[in-house]
Image (cartoon, rainbow, N blue to C red):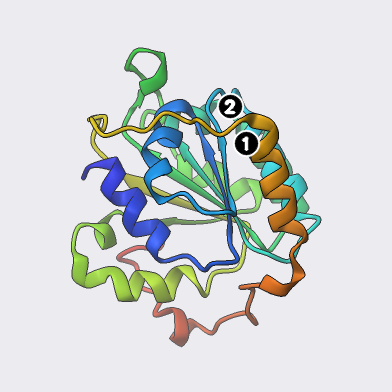
């Protein structure tokens, strides 16, 4: 599956009051077509995104999503351990796994070579889901919407994508200062409310071995 299409479909499942932090140059550029006030882009992340997201999530009741690649995930394990230990219910870490460090020349990652990447992140205190199958069919999007909007964090979501890079990338022309001011204003806007819900029941989530790891 093409990453830009997965980005589009995943973002369509989110709420207007959600905060989304995009990590890495290519992911940030591909996400710009869907830009909103609550979106923040870190083109050169180097492990910054999870730490920033954790700080934000601890200061707001809005949901905070990190969209990252598998290469970024491998670089940010210590931050993921801190997120898990913090037990924040409004933080969700989404890994678009294409098997390479795309922004660094396409060199392969060891993401799939780790004996149990799910077990490692579970051990940090996350709930882990692989939702790849749900993004292969448009008919699954309503169910995806229900699943995503009933989760309680910290949650890690894995979605497999191919190695292709969108030819329709948009350069980030928002000044960093303006981007910072925009996200600060969005976080402080209490009129937007929160998307956090009471803990869902197993029946509401429709938990199946098909997607839960």
Name the quadrant containing residue 112.
top left
Look at the image and tell me whether residue 138 can be seen: yes
Residue 205 located left or right of residue 134:
right
**Residue at 31% across / 33% down in the picture?**
98
Q: CA distance from mark 2 to mark 1?
A: 6 Å
Q: Quadrant of the C terminus?
A: bottom left
Q: Nearer the viewer, residue 139 or 182?
A: 182
**Residue at 65% across / 30% down in the picture?**
176
Quickly name the residue at label 2: 45
Q: Give the numbered dot on residue 128.
A: none
Q: How many marks?
A: 2
**Residue at 44% across / 87% down in the picture?**
203
Residue 209 located left or right of residue 39:
left
Relative to 107, does residue 125 appear above or below in the rendering?
A: below
Residue 69 located left or right of residue 142:
right
* Residue 119 percent location from the top left of the image: 51, 46
Q: Secondary structure at mark 1?
A: helix
Q: Nearer the viewer, residue 80 or 64?
A: 64
Q: Secondary structure at mark 2?
A: loop
Quickly name the residue at label 1: 49
Dot 1: within a 10 Å radius of its alpha carbon, few (fewer than 14), some, or many (20 or more) residues?
Answer: many
Dot 2: within a 10 Å radius of its alpha carbon, few (fewer than 14), some, or many (20 or more) residues?
Answer: some
* Residue 177 percent location from the top left of the image: 70, 33
* Residue 154 percent location from the top left of the image: 63, 57
**Residue at 34% across / 67% down in the picture?**
209
Residues under numbered marks 2 and 1 in contact, where contact means CB atoms less than 8 Å apart: yes
Q: Nearer the viewer, residue 31 or 197?
A: 31
């Amino acid at each position: 599956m093409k990453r830009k299409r997965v980005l589009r479909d995943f973002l369509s499942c989110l709420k207007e009051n959600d905060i989304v932090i995009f990590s890495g140059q290519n992911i940030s550029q591909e996400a710009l077509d869907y830009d909103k006030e609550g979106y923040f882009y870190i083109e050169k992340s180097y492990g910054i995104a999870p730490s920033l997201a954790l700080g934000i999530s601890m200061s707001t009741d809005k949901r905070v999503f990190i969209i990252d690649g598998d290469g970024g995930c491998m670089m940010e394990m210590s931050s993921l351990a801190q997120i898990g230990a913090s037990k924040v219910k409004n933080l969700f870490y989404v890994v678009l796994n294409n098997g390479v460090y795309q922004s660094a020349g396409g060199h392969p990652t060891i993401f799939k070579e780790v004996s149990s990447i799910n077990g490692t992140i579970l051990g940090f205190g996350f709930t882990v889901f692989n939702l790849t199958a749900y993004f292969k069919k448009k008919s699954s999007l309503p169910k995806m919407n229900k699943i995503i909007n009933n989760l309680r964090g910290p949650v890690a979501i894995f979605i497999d994508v191919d190695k292709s890079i969108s030819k329709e990338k948009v350069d980030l022309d928002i000044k960093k200062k303006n981007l910072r001011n925009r996200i600060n204003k969005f976080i402080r806007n209490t009129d937007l409310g929160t998307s956090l819900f009471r803990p869902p029941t197993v029946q509401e989530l429709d938990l199946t071995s098909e997607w839960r790891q």
